[in-house]
Image (cartoon, helix red, strand yellow):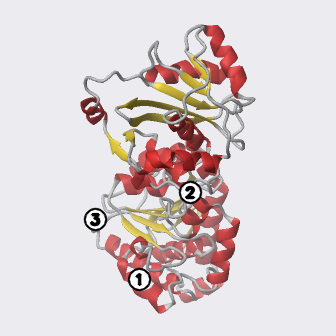
Amino acid sequence: MSWHIEFLCAELQKVVLCWERKEKQLDVLINLPFGLSKSTVLQLLQAWITLRNPSVKILGTSYAGRISAKNSGKVRECLKSPKFQSWYPGVVIFNKEIDGKTQFGTEAKGIYYTSSTDSAATGMHSDFIFNDDPLSAKQANSEKKRDTVNDFISNTLSSRKTEEYTVTVTVMQRLHLEDPAGMLLAKKQLNHINLPARVDAHNRSLVKPVVALSYYDAHDGYLNPVRFGEAKIAEYKGELSHFAYAAQVMQNPADDSTGLIKKDDFEIINWQQFLAVTAGSNVVWNFDADTALTANRANDPTALLASCVVKGTTYIRESYSCWMEQDDLVAFLPEFLKRNGATTTSTLYVEPKANGKPIVNTLSRSGNILVEEAPNPTSDKVQRLHNVLPEINKYNVKLIDGHWIVAFLQELTAFPNGKHDDRVDTLTQCLARLTVPAKKKPIIY
């Protein structure tokens, strides 16, 4: 048995004993890689809780109703098994009127029921809430789905507690900077258990609690030498994108160690600071677009960037990514420009490719936007970024604080290994104007 099983059981046992003493405690967040029996640990834990407290009320949730039902069925199967009943005769007596795979009860008025992040809110309250994989790897790519799940956890599950000492246990692999784990860590204090697949001198600070480091050290730095040994980790590193590997295997979606751009290359300032440093300057907001003209999220999105240059420093006001067909995008662009300070002197620069030309042509007929095709790229994406990296490395690009920054930095620091690079394209297109004069004059309509 891998050491992490015993470690998790010991940590979760402390949580249960604290609850039995009716002591208020922090909710628990456990992050560890896939395929390490975390669901089985939770299922057996819930059976153990029911054995000790047959009147307990437990809510089990997951990213899909079928997964919640599967987990519930395993708990029920354990409690009903002949071996369990022979070891603990008469302790857990099932209520014949409430005895299904998604909900079952005991004669002691205990109940186990399920919900999921893809279902309607439940009205029942619980002593324990177990949130096992609230978001799938596929769902993590959707901002809308992430927001839905995070809202479910923040507003629905948080209101389902029976007492102030009710505890929520969330277990998942890291999938995204703004996944439920990221949301929870940003919002509240947690009992956080974070176990990457491999620990070395560079990532020891990721391990939580620090006492777990002694277990890693006793096993040559591995969480599970069989499931995630050296050869297997190398295999996953080759199969997964850099970001997926950093998040799902190493539990560190903020890792930017192999990207060309680092988060620390950017200073983040608030709007008041921007107004102070640009006071008295002529601020003109310009815009860059890398258009895709598709609503299919399996394809690359459209990326938009709002920026200005004051005294040699580029200030980014917003980076936005969306999947829209041509008509929807044309209707949305004026809204994006307006909310980011566009004036009659502002220009929208559109990447000169097949998808960009119809946008230029359509907007030109509106007579409301100064629009220009950006210069044709003469090198590949990586080289174009290298051309403007000095501006970034000299801290000449500053970000004005906003909700967009997390996704923006995530894509930039993953480049060239990330899934999408459209935000990168808009930034390089924007910065290229500082060193490469536009060959065309704006087309005024």
Q: Nearer the viewer, residue 243 or 422?
A: 422
Find residue 415 and report its horizontal and vertical position in percent: 58, 53
Report how far apart the C-alphas of labels 3 and 2 lie in the structure: 24 Å
Report how far apart the C-alphas of labels 1 and 2 lie in the structure: 35 Å
Q: Residue at x 55, y 10 (%)?
A: 368
Find residue 272 and report its horizontal and vertical position in percent: 26, 33
Q: Earlier in the sequence, mark 1 or mark 3?
A: 3
Picture disc at residue 213: 1
Q: Are marks 1 and 2 in contact (CB under 8 Å)?
A: no
Q: Residue at x 44, y 68 (%)?
A: 55
Query: Which amino acid type is marked by label 3?
Result: Lys
Q: Residues within 10 Å of mark 2 (few under 14, many from 20)?
A: many
Q: Nearer the viewer, residue 222 or 272?
A: 272
Q: Residues within 10 Å of mark 1 (few under 14, many from 20)?
A: some
Q: Earlier in the sequence, mark 3 or mark 2?
A: 3
| Drawn side of residue 282 relative to residue 58, left or right | left
- In the displayed structure, 440 sits above or below 192; it is above
Report how far apart the C-alphas of labels 1 and 3 lie in the structure: 27 Å
- In the displayed structure, 195 sits above or below 138; it is below
Quadrant of image for the N terminus: bottom right
Task: Look at mark 2 in the image and give the residue it sits on.
Answer: 114
Query: Which amino acid type is marked by label 1?
Result: Leu
Find residue 208 and report its horizontal and vertical position in percent: 39, 73
Q: Residue at x 48, y 79 (%)?
A: 199
State whether residue 156 appears in this view: no
**To which quarter of the image does residue 300 belong?**
top right
Query: Which amino acid type is marked by label 2?
Result: Thr
Picture disc at residue 24: 3
